[in-house]
Image (cartoon, rainbow, N blue to C red):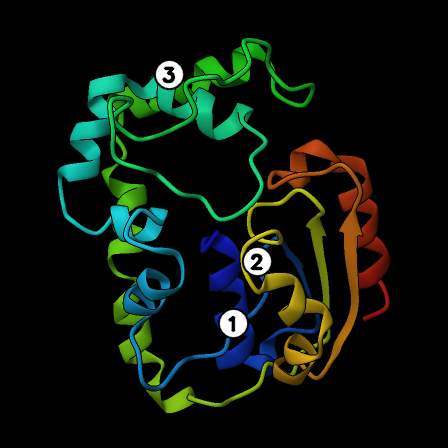
């Protein structure tokens, strides 16, 4: 939910003179809460089993993922089309991923693709990715000078109607109710793709490419 799009948003916020336009997938810009750190805010909003909260203790999630194996973890992440916030409840399945994940791969993911990802994570482990979320409160500290600042570059936002971010509590209201446009005054268009979930750049790759091309070429 809080991943690469966040890096793009903050680049636009910090150095708008370098960015002609931004096409963002899945995760909208979220204003900084000056009174509460990011992890505390997510904990209060979604509970202690929210994925960012579960990732915070070094070594703990790595151990749970090692218990079930990289293949199990990646199959559940990539194959399960779950709406609502990503919750990893503690329990017998280690990471709390859905044990009823379908056996068949989605149309946009080949067996060779999955095998490649599994072999890489079996070699490196998941610590590198998890550490991104363990440092997210440092971002909150460092962005204090930009509190209340708006993102001023032209933006096109694309999400899937089944995306875990889009279907999380309060997100649709923020995106469509004026809050998003208030924080990003040059938000030119919001696209919600029918039948598409979180990995929209793979699930609808041609449509995404066309949206990016048509928007960027204007600038």
- Is the residue marked by circle 3 packed among few (<14), some (14-19), or many (20+) residues within 10 Å? some
Q: Which mark is residue 27?
A: 2
- Is the residue marked by circle 1 packed among few (<14), some (14-19), or many (20+) residues within 10 Å? some
Q: Which residue is mark 3?
A: 71
Q: Which residue is mark 1?
A: 30
Q: Which mark is residue 155?
A: none
In percent of the image, x 56 and y 35: which residue is there?
82
Going from the N terminus, do you reach mark 3 or mark 1 first?
1
Relative image position of residue 75 (x, y in whole percent): 46, 20
Task: Give the Cα distance between marks 1 and 2.
Answer: 9 Å
Pick the residue in front: 206 or 178: 178
Residue 150 falls in image quadrant: bottom right
Task: Give the Cα distance between marks 3 and 1.
Answer: 32 Å
Q: Secondary structure at mark 1?
A: loop
Relative image position of residue 217 (x, y in whole percent): 84, 62
Q: Secondary structure at mark 3?
A: helix
Residue 86 falls in image quadrant: top left
Does the residue at mark 1 contact the one at mark 2 (Cβ under 8 Å)? yes
- Quadrant of the frame with the C terminus: bottom right
In percent of the image, x 25 and y 35: which residue is there?
90
């Amino acid at each position: 939910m809080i991943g690469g799009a966040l890096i793009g948003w903050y680049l636009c916020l910090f150095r708008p003179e370098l960015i002609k336009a931004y096409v963002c997938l899945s995760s909208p810009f979220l204003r900084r809460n000056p009174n509460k750190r990011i992890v505390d805010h997510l904990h209060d909003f979604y509970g202690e089993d929210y994925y960012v909260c579960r990732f915070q203790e070094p070594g703990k999630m790595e151990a749970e993922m090692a218990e079930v194996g990289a293949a199990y973890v990646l199959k559940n992440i990539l194959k399960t089309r779950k709406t609502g916030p990503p919750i990893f409840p503690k329990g017998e399945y280690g990471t709390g991923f859905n044990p009823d994940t379908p056996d068949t791969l989605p149309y946009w993911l080949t067996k060779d693709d999955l095998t490649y990802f599994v072999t890489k994570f079996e070699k490196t482990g998941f610590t590198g990715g998890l550490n991104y979320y363990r440092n997210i409160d440092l971002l909150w500290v460092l962005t204090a000078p930009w509190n209340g600042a708006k993102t001023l570059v032209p933006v096109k936002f694309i999400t899937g109607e089944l995306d875990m971010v889009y279907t999380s509590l309060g997100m649709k209201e923020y995106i469509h109710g004026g809050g998003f446009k208030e924080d990003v005054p040059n938000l030119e268009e919001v696209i919600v793709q029918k039948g598409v979930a979180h990995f929209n750049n793979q699930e609808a790759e041609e449509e995404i490419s066309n949206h990016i091309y048509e928007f960027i070429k204007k600038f």
